[in-house]
Image (cartoon, coloured by chain):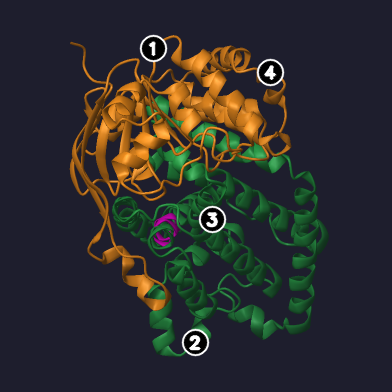
Chain colours: A green, B orange
Amino acid sequence: MMMRSLSELWIFFWRDLSIARTYRTVFVLEAVEALFGVAMFFYVARFVDSPQLQHALPQGGSYFAFSLIGFVFLDYLNAAMDTFDRSLEEARDSGTLEHLLVTQTSLPVTLAGSAIYPFVAMTFRIAVYVAWGAILFHFPLRDANWLAVAAVLIATLLAFSGLGILSASYLLLFKRGNPAKWFLLGVSSVAGGMLFPISVLPDWLQFVAHLNPVTYALDAMRAALLGGAGLRAILQPLLVLLLFAAVLLPVSMAVFAWALRRTKTTGTLMHR
Amino acid sequence: MSEAAISVANLEKSFPPARSGWRALLQPFEKPSVVALAGISFEVRPGEALALLGANGAGKSTLIRILATLLLPTQGHARIAGHDAVLDPRAVRRQLGYHAGSDSGFYSRLTGRENLRLFGRLNHLSNAAAKKRIASLATQFHLEEALDRQLRTLSSGTVQRLSLARALLHQPRVLLLDEPTRSLDAIAASEFRRFLKSEILRSGDTSLLFASHTLPEVELLADRVAVIDAGRVLACDTPPALKHATGAPTLEGAFMHLTGRAPHLVPEDAPE
């Protein structure tokens, strides 16, 4: 059973990789886009950087490293929240959704399988950003703890996949929009520590930031990548992220199954 | 007597009324009040081909989609090879192949072979079994050339044959076709019917339930015809028996007699 599910997950990954390979130039264009993004953050940082600012950053170091991690990581969260409803929307629009649903593959495997390639591609994209930063703009990588970085990525992915599946359920029921995503990304851009540390926020916004999983994900990622923190040092934010995942994943799967059942009742599965 | 391939008993289906504007947000939660099926019962025997003949909106597609586990009935039972479509949908999906003429439901950037392989694997065929089955179906359906071309480069007739091949990949006992020739031109539709008759129905291994409002299609393929109107089966018998019972010289005449109104059907000599 386990082997069969793994094989099905692989076949979804293979599907998306095969489709992506037919758009080869996109890889090149995205790498160039990443270069421009990194360069922009480097020069903004050069403009605003000062000893006082560096002192105010949690891991010390340059504002360039701080802001670049905030920027690419928020992109990662965006992908985690986007990938389920985007693959659902594509399947609905191309007419493949019905044909996927009449196969013998279970719904959780279909959902998880459709998310693997976007997550792998996004991780690769982050790697390209960091690589450009390291090669051309002295992004500090020598202290990075890669095991801790991988743990943060996986915990973040799990925590935010639940939200992604919830937004796919919303899409299934109401056909358009993703309010949870825009709300969370909106809040996170202010109260998540993306481009500035949350210590500069008023107390009530700091309270909001501490309820936001993005804050924990970014703290842990910066600590692991810039400060070289090991698993033990980032245990607390990791546990918070895993707690989010433990609550959100089963709830979101149940909500999605209910939403699917509802659309099978109302006959709106393929409506746009 | 052997178990019915398809068994439908007192099947009812109602949908919530369609809404627009902000009221559309309430639609998933509205009570179903628009009747699509009003208590349908019939059986399809193993190896038999039964046509659902009715005007647009008669309930043909709704019935097929309930059997395909894509819709949930309001009341009654729908069984395929003894498995209930509501209580045991995965067992039902093991037994059925589904093909809708209104959309191809393929990945346009993948080749025919890649598409078939994907759906074969999701129907629990091993890699080797999927390869073998694809090769065999490609020969049978004259699809050898289409296998290594991207879907977007194929003609609609070829895509329909490919879709039929997909429905048969896992050797289902029951084939559900929803207006299979709907998007084909007259020549392609005629070839498709001949092909269905000679390659699928001749063997007697597969039971077929298909919806159509194309009379030549019904007369060529069906052993029996269920005339449906306003969600009810008005009559279910062989084409000669229907003509005899109504005293009509043609199936079109029998349909008009039974439904008591001019049909939106394609007469035998009209182009499709």
Three-letter amino acid code of the residue under disc 4:
Glu
Are dots 1 and 3 on a single chain? no
Q: Which mark is residue A86?
A: 3
CA gap between label 2 and label 1 equals 71 Å
Three-letter amino acid code of the residue under disc 1:
Asp
- The residue tagged with tag 2: helix, strand or loop? loop
Q: Mark 4 and 1 residues: CB-CB less than 8 Å, in contact?
A: no
Which residue sits at x=38%, y=50%? B57
Other residues around mark 3 within 10 Å, as few (<14) / some (14–19) / many (≥20): some
Residue B42's x, y, as percent? Answer: 23, 30
- The residue tagged with tag 1: helix, strand or loop? loop
Q: Which mark is residue A201?
A: 2
The residue stretch that appears in magenta: A160-167
CA gap between label 3 and label 4 equals 33 Å
Q: Earlier in the sequence, mark 3 or mark 2?
A: 3
Other residues around mark 4 within 10 Å, as few (<14) / some (14–19) / many (≥20): some
Three-letter amino acid code of the residue under disc 3:
Arg
Name the residue carrying label 1.
B205
- The residue tagged with tag 3: helix, strand or loop? helix
Q: Is residue B266 above or below residue A25?
A: above
- The residue tagged with tag 4: helix, strand or loop? loop
CA gap between label 4 and label 1 equals 24 Å
In this rendering, the label closer to the viewer, 2 or 4: 4
Q: Write down the chain letter for disc 3.
A: A
